[in-house]
Image (tube, coloured by chain):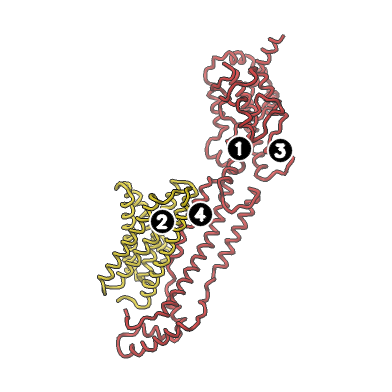
Chain colours: A red, B yellow
Amino acid sequence: MRRDLRLRALEGQLLSHLLRQGARKLLAWLGLSLLAWSLGQLGFVLLGPPAWASSALLLGLLSLAPLALFWPDEEGTLLRELRRLDPDTTLEAWLGARPGPARDLLCLRARQVDEGLGFRKMPGAPGFYRGLGRLFSLACLGLAVLQLVALLVLHHPLLAWSAAEASRTRATGLGRAIEEEASPGQAEAYRYAEEEERQAPDASPWREGLSAEEGELSLGQGTSLARRLGKGEEASAAEAEAKSEPSPGEAGPGPGSLPGLGQGREDQAGPGIEMAGAGGGTAKDAPRKGQGGKAGAGQGFSGSGPMPSDSPLESYLTRLLGADTSSPGKSKTASRDLGLAELRAFERRYFLSLSLGPGLLRRDSGRALQLKARWKALKGRGR
Amino acid sequence: MRRALAVLAVAAAGLGSWLVLAKLEPALGGGLVLSACLEEAMKVLMLGMALVLGRSLGQAPGKALLLGLMAIGVFAAAENLAYLLAFQSPDILERLLWSEPIHLVSGLAWALGLGGLARGPDRLVARLLAFLGLGALALAWHLGLNLLAIGPLPSPGREGHGLALALAGLGNGLAIFMLGRSFVQRVIIGGFLYGED
């Protein structure tokens, strides 16, 4: 090391140059991160992953900031800066000189140049923003595309994928479709449980009595009944049936406790929830969406207590009337403008109901026949 | 091509070192002190290997050490993501103010010490002492903040947690700035202007 002279001003200039380069690298990282963030959020909107995916993306991008800071500069960047600061190459000549009289002479001159550097106002190095404009334009374009897609799919702008968005998207739209494709859904589980139930030996006198009459219900009747009952109604009817069977009010395992299409998730306002809350009340009493949990307590949830009516038929009719007359809630209100996601969800549910027709028909036939048998029995008793 | 290879090598070194430590630490019984010592040893190893490889390829010590620091950055990022997979909660982002800067501070301290040693055999004892002092600083910083995190630091949600986190972030930031500036001045600019002794 040449200890006879330390070029402090030159060192300072080179340091500020490297700090500028560091700032430039951080800006480039910021632009790239914005672009990656937009693309990531776009993917989240379309795929509906769990909320922590957003945290993972943020954590990953922020964790990579030091890499941008430590990224080595191009070869020769310091040499170019040195030649820009000292176009006469006096400093370079002194730095490269071998020990001897010539070097001592150069040392004097180098000291003067270095002292001059401390007082001279140097123009900023060109090319600081080179390429950054394009990168940030691309990042802005990515953000714009993200907002557009978010407005189309979620109906509001989106900057970060949150837990609320994740649950909302799982409840409707593509996220749920993907989720159901990935794992056997509740419909599958219900069908499987139904098959199990059918195949299991049933000593119930009901079933024995019904089996003789099974052919009585025509296809048209079954279909119309299935459509009328809908999905949640069916689950509620099954629940009423389970409640009324051995001893009223006593919770027991029955078809109503099976997960069905009408039973939505907890975060999903499904008709099944509404209907469960409506059980035992009149049409006016039928609680709206969101009130089912409270209003339904003691009114027909399995394990929640005795039902007001011990008669399964009364219970069924009450529920059916409730279903027909009460407002089905926000999710079924057709008078307002439907968003694209809701429209897709309704379309999906509609076609799903068509595809499940035979299954529903078989199952509903059984229930309808059970009810029919009871209806007949009651009528017979009444007469 | 060389740049792409360097990036690949950095990523492989960072991820590989994290995988090795993820297996090694539980096998040796874990513990804060042991973990900190093993991680610091891994950092010195990565920086030393970067220095030796870089010199054999004709790179300046500063540039080689920067690649080693990048590998430490990859190591810290891998650790962050591993923690996120284990604890999927938003407060995992607090690691960016606490845990990740610890690795950067200690990495910079080691790099500064190694950069001094790479300047040549002149004044070797003084440089060796400086290297050991900076290494002790790195280990103390790592261990001290880890002990603080499980000890007197208020846990998330408690009163004072945010303040402690902000103070730690500020301290880490200042340490990174000072060590980074010193590294650039002494190792990169000093190496470029004056070369080896």
Specify which label sits upstream in the sequence, 1 or 4. 4
Marker disc for residue A333: 3
4 or 3: tag closer to the N-terminus: 4
Amino acid under label 1?
Answer: Gln
Establish whether labels 2 and 1 are both on one chain. Answer: no
The residue type indicated by label 2 comes to: Ala
| A213 or B60, nearer to the observer | B60
A92 or A305: nearer the viewer = A305
Chain letter of mark 4 equals: A
Residue where numbered disc 4 is placed = A58
Same chain? Circles 3 and 1: yes
Location of the C terminus of chain A (image quadrant):
top right
x, y percentage for residue A12? 43, 77
Q: Callout 3 environment at 10 Å: few (<14), some (14 to 19), or many (20+)? A: few
Q: Give residue A358's position: percent from left, percent from top.
A: 63, 28
Tell me, yes or no, whether the two marked residues, 4 and 3, touch with CB atoms within 8 Å. no
Proximity of marks 2 and 3: CB atoms separated by less than 8 Å: no
In the rendered structure, which disc, 3 or 1, sits on the residue that comes first in sequence?
1
Q: Is residue B5 visible?
A: no
Q: Which residue is at a point 50% across and 81% down the rendered structure image?
A: A122
